[in-house]
Amino acid sequence: MTEAQHQSALIKWSQLPQIRARYPELKLLHHIPNGGRRDPIEAKHLKAQGVKPGVPDLCLPVARGNFHGLYIEMKTETGRPSDDQKWWIKELNDQKYKAVICHGWEEAKKCLTDYLS
């Protein structure tokens, strides 16, 4: 599976009625469309609007324990984070967010359920 397919599988799982009944906060889970290939003009406009490389793929703006919210950087089972992605994970954790890299949608699912439990 590609990274996009893993992320789509996670979102599909999070929208199942029985999952939403158990974890209603998942209604706030959203994708941050910061990546992808863009033509130079669009890239320039997006950069001017605040797009930054390495921002994690998913955000759950729900506080739990000592954390303000959860950020997830999705990867395939063998994917590796970029230096920008590692920087964001560290900085978000320093700001009291839980920020993680998940390899595959099932790892991300476990991360979400552990965080919300």
Image: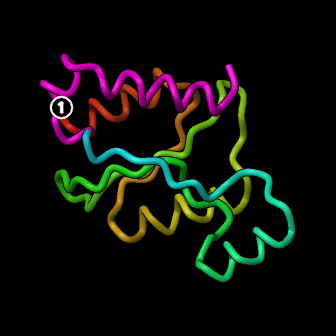
In the picture, the quarter occupied by the N terminus is top right
Residue 3 lies in the magenta-colored region: yes
Query: Between residues 41 and 5, which one lies in front from this camera angle?
Result: 41
Q: Amino acid at mark 1?
A: Tyr
Vertically, is 24 above or below 60?
Answer: above
Q: Which residue is mark 1?
A: 23
Side of 11 relative to 64 (left or right): right
Which residue lies most toward the bottom here? 48
Q: Which span is picked out in magenta?
A: 1-26
> Measured from the top left, where is residue 43 in percent x and y?
77, 69
Q: Nearer the viewer, residue 21 or 111?
A: 21
Residue 25: give x, y in percent of width and height: 19, 42
Residue positioned 27% across, 32% down in the render: 114
The secondary structure that most of the magenta stretch takes on is helix
Q: In the picture provided, is 89 more to the left or to the right than 37?
A: left
Q: Position of residue 80 (x, y in %)?
A: 72, 40
